[in-house]
Image (cartoon, helix red, strand yellow):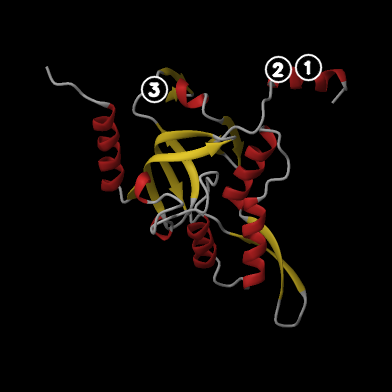
Amino acid sequence: MTTITEADVEQVALDWLSSLGWAVAHGPDIPPDMPGAERVSYEDVVLELRLRDALDRLNPDLPVEALDDAFRKLMRLEDAMLEVPNRHFHRLLVDGVKVPYRDHDGNERWKDARIIDYENATNNDWLAVNQFTVKERRRRRRADVVLFVNGLPNGVESAAVRVSQGVLMGCDVLIGMDIINMGDSAVTNRGGVTMLSFQMPSISHIDFVELLGERKRQGI
């Protein structure tokens, strides 16, 4: 009888992603303390250089100052409540980051800096990293596979998780229950696009039933 290990499942996932055009990197080869480092600290979950390169590539008509502003807004979500950052971040992914800039006549203009190219998928940077380690409050967690689009983490996969399966509007739904314990997740919808957002490490706790009850009490 052939034994299928966690590493086998992980490798199958990486091979499949590679066949779809994703670049693949091994987490231990790109840690903060190595020559091929993609981030400064284990606490970083965004690959900042890839994000900045994507902003430059997707917004050639915006000045450097506007791109710097877009980058800062992406890196700093001020509200710590779960449903606010996920809803806000989803809107940024779909619509872009609204930034001011000066035109040739010195007039202030506003424009949405694109984060993802939805018309030409090959214009994006697709990266799958296995054994990706994140440090949270002196504790390290390691995800089997993390999917980055233009430097932003957009998916977490595990080769050894317990899952529950269901059906939603005719679509299969598969949720890794162990993955939920590693961070915060939320489902948002804007402009007809539904997105499952996940952030790691966890930053907050929210009970939507309790939140709804509080809003009813306040008459909202």
Tag shown at residue 161: 3
Identify the residue at the far bottom of this view. 105
Tag shown at residue 7: none
Residue 209 horizontal/vertical position (percent): 70, 17
Residue 131 horizontal/vertical position (percent): 37, 39
Camera-nearest residue between 31 and 130: 31
Nearer the observer: mark 3 or 2; the answer is: 3
| SS at badge 2 | helix
Residue 210 horizontal/vertical position (percent): 74, 17
Query: Which numbered disc, 1 or 3, marks the residue that appears first in the sequence?
Result: 3
Residues at marks 1 and 3, CA–CA distance in whole angstroms: 33 Å
Q: Amino acid at mark 2?
A: Val
| SS at badge 3 | loop
Identify the residue position indicated by label 1 in the image: 213
Residue at horizontal 46 percent and vertical 38 percent from the top: 155
Identify the residue position indicated by label 2 in the image: 209
Q: Amino acid at mark 3?
A: Val
Nearer the observer: mark 1 or 3; the answer is: 3
Residue at horizontal 68 percent and vertical 46 percent from the top: 77
- Disc 1 to disc 2: CB gap under 8 Å: yes
Which quarter of the rendered picture does the N terminus lie within? top left
* Label 3 crowd (10 A; few <14 / some 14-19 / many >=20): few
75 left or right, relative to 57: right
| SS at badge 1 | helix
* Label 1 crowd (10 A; few <14 / some 14-19 / many >=20): few
Query: Which numbered disc, 3 or 2, marks the residue that appears first in the sequence?
Result: 3
104 left or right, relative to 43: right
